[in-house]
Each structure stands twice: as structure tokens, then as C-alpha cells.
């Protein structure tokens, strides 16, 4: 029974993700914080030419201001990092509690992470001022994919060194 305590890692992490997804955007807005730590206006000449559409919104310095532009990339990077960690936590829990082959652990961890990413976006659909978006699921899945690749490379490195 004690070995199953490692499952608290992915379950706890999913709880943190759930809480974050249940928080309205206004309570997560980091633009005011960004404005107090550094004056990022020095970046504007380097990035003011960047403009693209994401989830039917224009992402540019002109549209969002420099702090909103930076916040966009921080938030999307967080999607990748958070689901990277979730995949790692699933792998760790499977490794410590099952006799499943390494390849299947990676597959199960990836699939469970993607399923949770979909559920997370659906959950955002019922959260005030939040919208579900398939593009975010792709970012989450990319984070999970990078985690699996990193773990495969780490395993190979360990085998070579052993």
C-alpha cells in the first residue's frame, strides 16, 4: 500500500491544474506584476513586427501591449511545462508501482496526460471568463511528448553509462 503513495504526485499535480483552470483569467492576470518587475518596453523594437492569430485573437505588441505579449508566451509556455511534469509524474508512478515495460509506461503516461488535457479544456468551458481551445490541448500534448522524448533519451544515456 505504501508504494502507491507515489500516485499522489500525478493526482496532486492534476488537482493543481484543476484549481488553476477553475480560476477566472482576471485572477491570473500577470501583466500588472510584469509591469512592476521590469520595464519591458526595450523589447518592443525587436518584437513589434510579430503578429499572428491564436484562438481568434490577434497576438501582437500593438494589440496586447508589451506586457500582454510577454504574458501570452509565459502562459503558453506554462501549458507545455505543466503537462511535461504531469507526464513525468505518471511515468514515475507507473515505474514505482507496476511491472509494465518501459515503452508501455511512456505510452500510458502520454495518453493519460492528453486525456487530462482534454478534460482540463472542457473544464475551462464552464469557468467564468475562460474558454476551451483545442490549440491549448495541442500545446499540452506537445509538453507530454517532449517529456516522453526526454525520458527515452535519459534511459538510453543511463544504459550507455551502465
Image (spheres, rainbow, N blue to C red):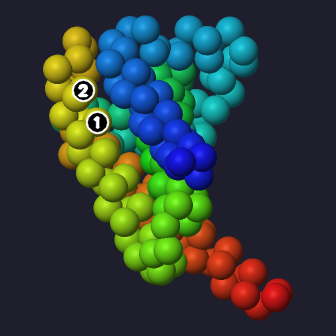
Q: Residue at x 48, y 55 (%)?
A: 90
Residue 70: x %, y % from top left: 53, 30
Q: Residue at x 53, y 16 (%)?
A: 30
Residue 148: x %, y % from top left: 50, 68
Q: Quadrant of residue 118?
A: top left
The disc placed on residue 35 is none
Q: Residue at x 56, y 8 (%)?
A: 32
For residue 101, side relative to residue 44 (left or right): left
For residue 121, side relative to residue 106 (left or right): left
Residue 146: x %, y % from top left: 51, 64
- Judge whether 152 appears above or below 74 on screen: below
Residue corresponding to mark 1: 120
Q: Residue at x 23, y 17 (%)?
A: 127
Q: Nearer the viewer, residue 80 or 85?
A: 85
The disc placed on residue 124 is 2
Secondary structure at numbered mark 2: helix
For residue 138, side relative to residue 17 (left or right): left
Structural distance between the alpha carbons of marks 2 and 1: 6 Å
Marks 2/1 in contact by CB < 8 Å: the verdict is yes
Q: Is disc 2 surrounded by few (<14), some (14 to 19) or many (20+) residues within 10 Å?
A: many
Secondary structure at numbered mark 1: helix
The total number of labels drawn is 2
Q: Nearer the viewer, residue 23 or 55?
A: 23
Amino acid at each position: 500500500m505504501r508504494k502507491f503513495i507515489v500516485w499522489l504526485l500525478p493526482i496532486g499535480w492534476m488537482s493543481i491544474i484543476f484549481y488553476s483552470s477553475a480560476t477566472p483569467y482576471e485572477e491570473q492576470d500577470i501583466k500588472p506584476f510584469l509591469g512592476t518587475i521590469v520595464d519591458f518596453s526595450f523589447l518592443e523594437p525587436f518584437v513589434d513586427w510579430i503578429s499572428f492569430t491564436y484562438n481568434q485573437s490577434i497576438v501582437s505588441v500593438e494589440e496586447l501591449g508589451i506586457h500582454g505579449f510577454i504574458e501570452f508566451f509565459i502562459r503558453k509556455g506554462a501549458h507545455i511545462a505543466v503537462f511535461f511534469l504531469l507526464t513525468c509524474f505518471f511515468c514515475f508512478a507507473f515505474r514505482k508501482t507496476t511491472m509494465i515495460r518501459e515503452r508501455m509506461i511512456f505510452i500510458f503516461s502520454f495518453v493519460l496526460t492528453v486525456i487530462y488535457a482534454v478534460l482540463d479544456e472542457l473544464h475551462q468551458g464552464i469557468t467564468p471568463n475562460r474558454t476551451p481551445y483545442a490549440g491549448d490541448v495541442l500545446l499540452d500534448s506537445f509538453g507530454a511528448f517532449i517529456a516522453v522524448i526526454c525520458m527515452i533519451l535519459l534511459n538510453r544515456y543511463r544504459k550507455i553509462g551502465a
